[in-house]
Amino acid sequence: MSELNRILDQVEKDKGIDKKILIEALELAMLTVAQKKLGTAREIEAQYNEEAGEIELFEFKTVVDKVENPQVEMTIKEAKEIDPDAQVNDSLGVKLDSAEFGRIAAQAAKQVIIQKVREAERDIVFNEYKDRKGEVVTGILRRVEHKDLIIDLGKTEAVLLEEEQVAKERYHTGDRIQAYISNVHKISRGPQIVLSRIHPGLLIKLFETEVPEIYEGVIKIKGAVREPGDRAKIAVYSEDSDVDPVGACVGLKGSRVQNVVQELRGEKIDIVEWDPDPAKFVCNAIAPAEVQKVIIDKEEKLMQIIVGDDQLSLAIGKRGQNVRLAAQLTGWKIDLHSESQVKKKTEETKKILLKLQDMDTAQADLLLKQGFSDVLDIQALSDNDLSDMLGISVDRAKNILENLKKVVEEEKNKVTKEQEEKVTEVKNETESKESHSEPTSVENNDTKE
């Protein structure tokens, strides 16, 4: 076997590049070298001779009676010397001595093989990682480029962009980093594997690793949300009544969840039990706060959550994190109120309702019991809806809503007037104090001549 054949077979075996692709590339490289030296006007072809183990070059010329262009034509006499059966208009190929191209041809062949090997390696890496999007990988931090972290994954490098990093986390060269593959791009320099430490998928994958019941499908993860570096919520569910999904994820003495917390550098994790009943799910998601009452508005996909006064700050969480994450996890807008806030608003609404001519105490209480503690919610009702709720005629319901609009406007004007009077009072007091204050003495230090 020739040296070139051996090299091609070895490259095909080690790098997974089809030998035909290499041969085509070598033929093209040899042809390019010949055309540069002999000129593009000449008709030259390159062919691989497997037995000889070399790229052969042939120059083709047309047989003519009278030669006008020697580069592409030959006489019948010259043709007969090559092929006794040659005739006018035949195209004959003459083998060129490829040795005359020498070092240039050899260098070109070498560069072609190197280029094809690189392209093949890039394709292999891309094909391997394009289907791994959504997986968690572990690598070593090699360097930092413009605040982006370059992670060595073994066969290739990946990038952890600045915007995909947790602001509180700090790394040094040589540190081990686990991250979520958020995307894989094919660019001119090769595949770019984009990692993330902030993606909710990282939280999900870490739990799949730590909790065998999730991996086996006994427990299902219904959703996960994060405020990276601070707090996260994950919803879990099991159709098997004998399996406690939250307990399984927490683990013995909290061992499983602590492993995840440790990997996320101390991020607090709330494990929430998913429930097909939206109200129960929202109540679970707002934990550790205890919910007293839930009022659902399906059209607006809004839930009014009422908690005890001592539970309000717990329900809101640090900088509103708890209620914000609960809303993201459940997909419901959450309107959070304390018991005293609702009581105060209910009393104010009842006072306004009792001012209406066609409204009595029993009817007002009936509306309040149905969750209409805000006059704006009552105003939003149609004549027919209010009629059905109170068991009154549509005309009477219409009058109530019209009167309610007037009373609300009067109350609004009253509050505005009181606020304006208070501002004026404060302004007058300030001006009075300024007018009775001692005048300030200013000493003139100018020197008179």
Image: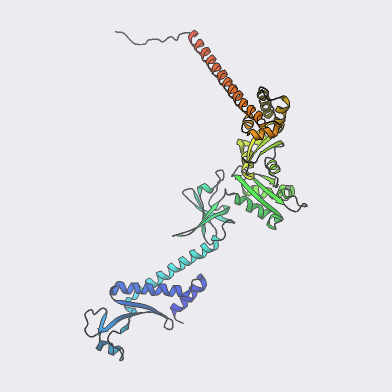
Q: Quadrant of the C terminus?
A: top left
Q: Residue 280 falls in which quadrant of the image?
A: top right
Q: Is residue 157 above or below residue 45?
A: above
Q: Nearer the viewer, residue 120 or 336?
A: 336
**In the image as oriented, which residue stretches furthest toward the right?**
242
Total number of numbered labels?
Answer: 0
| Left or right of 1 on screen, residue 237 | right
**Residue at (44, 73) in percent of width and height:** 22
- Identify the residue at image location x=57%, y=59%: 132
> Which quadrant of the structure image shows residue 86?
bottom left
Q: How is the image coloured?
A: rainbow
Quick check: 303 left or right of 39? right
Quadrant of residue 277 in the image?
top right
- The answer to whether residue 164 is above or below residue 417 is below
- Give percent across and percent down for residue 120: 48, 67
Residue 91: give x, y in percent of width and height.
31, 83
Where 426 sits versus 74, above or below?
A: above
| Residue 309 seen in this snapshot | no
Image position, residue 226 (x, y; %): 60, 45
- Seen in the image, is 3 located left or right of residue 261? left
Single out the residue that lies furthest toward the bottom: 84
| Viewer-closest of 113 and 321 | 321
Q: Is residue 10 visible?
A: yes
Q: Position of residue 62 (x, y in %)?
A: 28, 82
The relative height of residue 154 versus residue 279 in the rendered view (above or below) is below
